[in-house]
Structures are given as structure tokens and as C-alpha cells.
């Protein structure tokens, strides 16, 4: 009897434990996925594996790039007009053979301000300096728009509309060369003091400062060489005189007749000898003086 009671108790205990076990939640097994490290840290193990894999790997084959992958080696475009210098009133254009050439400027901008107007050597008011240079170009090339032969040498006297200028008296004209010499020297010295004088002319200025017998000559040579721009042809044209003519017209009414008198042969060009004579400097200056200055400067660079 005791045996049956004990067996019943044991069976009941097993049933209770089995019930409790069935109610216990199951745990899901987590599967960890291996992640690649963010950084390839060179540990001793990694280094040894890398060396071994590189030794066992086959030699890399050099594959020629596809034609489409090659970067197009284009030749940079160079403007043929970039090195062409055209005078005032002209622009560079390409001709039928794709060669650069200078032609008269097609159109000038319309100027509405009175201060943009200019007065020519014919005492005529023009709309702009561009219009003067354009018309002179038309006359040079024989364009039908040229108003006459006298406009082949038209140039600007000063900016602004033409106005009545007092006549330069005989006494004023006789004293003007001296005043012009002093003015040229003072300008050259002021430019040197402001560090604005081109380096090739510094020796001329320094010599003029220390040697008074060279003061006027050096100043005259400096300005003439400075005015002989494009082209460097050992002559200063009426157009190249503009930088000293136009600013002085309002202050020195004798500047225009003085510069006109410097052109002794009336060919619209002033040589260095004519310039020195006009300034009443009694010294022989070689025509290639500017070239000597340029050559001496280039050797000292």
C-alpha cells in the first residue's frame, strides 16, 4: 500500500515539473555574423597572412587601357592674335587663310558724355578717340568712308570739345624750349622718386641728378625713347606724341605749335635729332641711343 502511495506522489511530481517546463519561454539562439573591420589593422597575424598570400598569388598582368579610357590629349588653343600688335583704330582678325591680320575697327562704342569727346588737330570735335583712330585707318587703307587725304594724319589734340585757344606769342614760343626741358627733367625725377620710372632709364636719371651738364640731354633722351613705342622705328609719330600733348594743352597753349615745329621736314615723324634740336640742346646724340640703353639694361639683368 505504501508503495502505491509513493508511486502516485512521484508521478504527480513529474507531471507538475513537466508542466512548468512547458510554460518556460524558449530562448532563441543568436547567430553572430562576422563583420569586416572598419580599418585594416596590420596585426602580426594579418601581416604574415598578407605576405603569404602575396607570395602565392600569380604575377599581376598589365592590361593595356581601352581606347575609350585614354584621356584625349588635346593641344591647347592659342589665339594667333595674342602676339599681334595692331595700332590705334585697328583690331586683329583672321583672314581667309586663317592668318592674323590687322583691320580697321568695325564699330566704335557710342559715347554720350561730353568729356569723352576729343578735339583733333583740325580743330574738329569728334565723338570719341576711337572715332578719330578709326577714320585715320580708313584713309590709310583707302576706304571710301575716308573724308579726304588730310585725315590720313588726323590725331587728337586734347580731350573734350574744341575750344578757342589763345595764340602763342613770339616771346612765349622762344622761351618754350627752356620750359619744356625743365618740365621733362622734373617729370623724370618725380617718377624716379615714386619708384615709377622704368628700370632701364634709372641710370639716365641718376646721371642727370649728379651731372648738371647731362640734365637736359638725359631728360630729352628718356622721353623720346619712352614715346617711341609700337613700332620701335627710331621716330616719334604725331600720334605717339599724344601722351605729352593732350595733358598739357589746357595748361600750355604753346605745346601744339612747339611740337609742330619739331617736325622740321614735315613728314609727321620726329627723329631724335629733330627732338634734340627743337629743345635747343647743343649735343650730338646718336640715333640708336634707345637701342644702346636697352642693350645695356639687358646685360645688367
Image (spheres, rainbow, N blue to C red):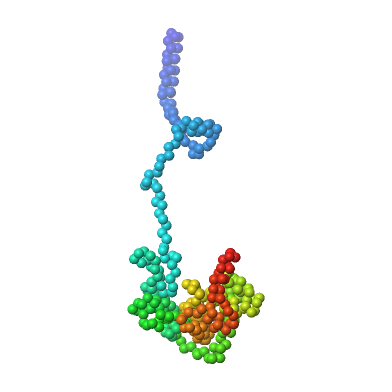
Q: Is residue 170 visible?
A: yes
Q: Quadrant of the N terminus?
A: top left
> Please, is residue 116 above or below residue 46 in the view?
below
Residue located 42% across and 65% down the image: 81
Q: Residue furthest top?
A: 1
Quarter-wise, where is residue 175 in the image?
Answer: bottom right
How many marks on residues?
Answer: 0
Q: Is residue 272 above or below residue 23?
A: below
Picture coordinates of residue 67, whole percent (x, y): 37, 46
Given the current orientation, which residue lies at the most extreme right position?
210
**Percent from the top left, x then y, of residue 203?**
61, 71
Residue at image point 62% right, 78% down: 214
Residue under the image location 40 percent in, 81 percent down: 151
* 55 relative to 280 in the view: left or right: left
79 vs 276: above or below: above
Towards the viewer: 32 or 163: 163
Task: Please tell me which residue is depicted at 44% across the width and 9% down the height of the picture.
Answer: 3
Locate the C terminus by quadrant. Answer: bottom right
| Residue 159 visible to an observer of this rendering | no
Horizontal relation, residue 229 to residue 207: left or right: left
Tell me where residue 64 appears, x and y as whole percent.
40, 42
Which quadrant of the view contains residue 170?
bottom right
Q: x and y percent of residue 261 in the render?
A: 50, 85
Farthest residue, direction bottom: 170
Amino acid at each position: 500500500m505504501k508503495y502505491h502511495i509513493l508511486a502516485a506522489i512521484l508521478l504527480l511530481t513529474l507531471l507538475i515539473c513537466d508542466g512548468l517546463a512547458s510554460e518556460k519561454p524558449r530562448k532563441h539562439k543568436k547567430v553572430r555574423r562576422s563583420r569586416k573591420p572598419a580599418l585594416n589593422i596590420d596585426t602580426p597575424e594579418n601581416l604574415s597572412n598578407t605576405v603569404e598570400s602575396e607570395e602565392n598569388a600569380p604575377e599581376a598582368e598589365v592590361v593595356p587601357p581601352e581606347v575609350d579610357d585614354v584621356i584625349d590629349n588635346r593641344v591647347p588653343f592659342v589665339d594667333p592674335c595674342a602676339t599681334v600688335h595692331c595700332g590705334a583704330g585697328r583690331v586683329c582678325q583672321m583672314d581667309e587663310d586663317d592668318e592674323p591680320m590687322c583691320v580697321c575697327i568695325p564699330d566704335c562704342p557710342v559715347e554720350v558724355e561730353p568729356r569723352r569727346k576729343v578735339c583733333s588737330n583740325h580743330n574738329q570735335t569728334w565723338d570719341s578717340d576711337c572715332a578719330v583712330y578709326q577714320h585715320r585707318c580708313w584713309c590709310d587703307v583707302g576706304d571710301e568712308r575716308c573724308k579726304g587725304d588730310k585725315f590720313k594724319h588726323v590725331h587728337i589734340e586734347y580731350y573734350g570739345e574744341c575750344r578757342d585757344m589763345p595764340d602763342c606769342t613770339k616771346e612765349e614760343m622762344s622761351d618754350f624750349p627752356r620750359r619744356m626741358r625743365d618740365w621733362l627733367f622734373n617729370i623724370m625725377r618725380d617718377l624716379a622718386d615714386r619708384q615709377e620710372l622704368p628700370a632701364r632709364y634709372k641710370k639716365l636719371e641718376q646721371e642727370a641728378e649728379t651731372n648738371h651738364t647731362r640734365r637736359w640731354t638725359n631728360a630729352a633722351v628718356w622721353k623720346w625713347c619712352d614715346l617711341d613705342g609700337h613700332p620701335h622705328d627710331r621716330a616719334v609719330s604725331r600720334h605717339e606724341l599724344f601722351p605729352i600733348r593732350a595733358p598739357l594743352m589746357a595748361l600750355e597753349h604753346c605745346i601744339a605749335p612747339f611740337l609742330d615745329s619739331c617736325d622740321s621736314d614735315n613728314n609727321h615723324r620726329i627723329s631724335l635729332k629733330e627732338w634734340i634740336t627743337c629743345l635747343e640742346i647743343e649735343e650730338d646724340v646718336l640715333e640708336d641711343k634707345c637701342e644702346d640703353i636697352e642693350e645695356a639694361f639687358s646685360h645688367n639683368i
